[in-house]
Image (cartoon, rainbow, N blue to C red):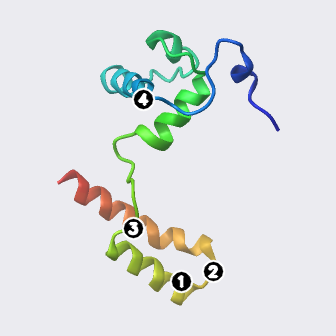
């Protein structure tokens, strides 16, 4: 498989992100948004990362609405009850979990 061609450039940093890089990316996006152009974003803020790496870092770790940590007791109970009633047919979980996500968003915004 290998890396994407954008990440094979000599001046592109690979590996773990530093707290300083996270702070730069988060601060820039909080103030300016992405503008939909992830490829140009690293150069604008002085990161030696490829656009794909910045996008994935934002989407998977830095977005403010990402829940870090384990499930709450309520969420854990819902998942267990769904497993008992539905079994391992995970595609059926989606319908039931959408209501959980909507509920979580409503609680978070209050």
CA gap, disc 3 and disc 1: 15 Å
Looking at the image, residue 86 lies above or below residue 14: below
Element under label 2? loop
Dot in front, 3 or 4? 4
Q: Residue at x 70, y 20 (%)?
A: 6
Q: Earlier in the sequence, mark 2 or mark 1?
A: 1
Q: Which residue is mark 4?
A: 22
Q: Which residue is mark 2?
A: 88
Tell me the crowding category of disc 4: few under 14, some 14 to 19, or many 20 or more residues within 10 angstroms, Cα based: some
Q: Residue at x 22, y 51 (%)?
A: 109
Residues under numbered marks 2 and 1 in contact, where contact means CB atoms less than 8 Å apart: yes
Q: Earlier in the sequence, mark 4 or mark 2?
A: 4
Q: Which residue is mark 1?
A: 83
CA gap, disc 2 and disc 1: 6 Å
CA gap, disc 3 and disc 4: 25 Å
Q: Residue at x 47, y 82 (%)?
A: 80
Quarter residue 14 falls in:
top right
Q: Earlier in the sequence, mark 1 or mark 4?
A: 4
Residues under numbered marks 1 and 4 in contact, where contact means CB atoms less than 8 Å apart: no
Q: Residue at x 75, y 31 (%)?
A: 3
Q: Which residue is mark 3?
A: 71
Element under label 4? helix
Circle on res. 94: none
Q: Quadrant of the N terminus?
A: top right
């Amino acid at each position: 498989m290998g890396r994407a061609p954008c990440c094979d450039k000599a001046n592109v940093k690979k590996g773990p992100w530093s707290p300083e890089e996270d702070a730069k990316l988060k601060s820039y996006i909080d103030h300016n948004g992405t503008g939909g152009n992830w490829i140009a974003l690293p150069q604008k803020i002085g990161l030696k990362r490829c656009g794909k790496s910045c996008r994935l870092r934002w989407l998977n770790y830095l977005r403010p609405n990402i829940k870090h940590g384990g499930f709450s007791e309520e969420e854990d109970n819902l998942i267990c009850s769904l497993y008992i009633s539905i079994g391992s047919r995970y595609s059926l979980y989606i319908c039931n979990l959408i209501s959980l996500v909507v509920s979580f968003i409503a609680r978070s915004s209050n």
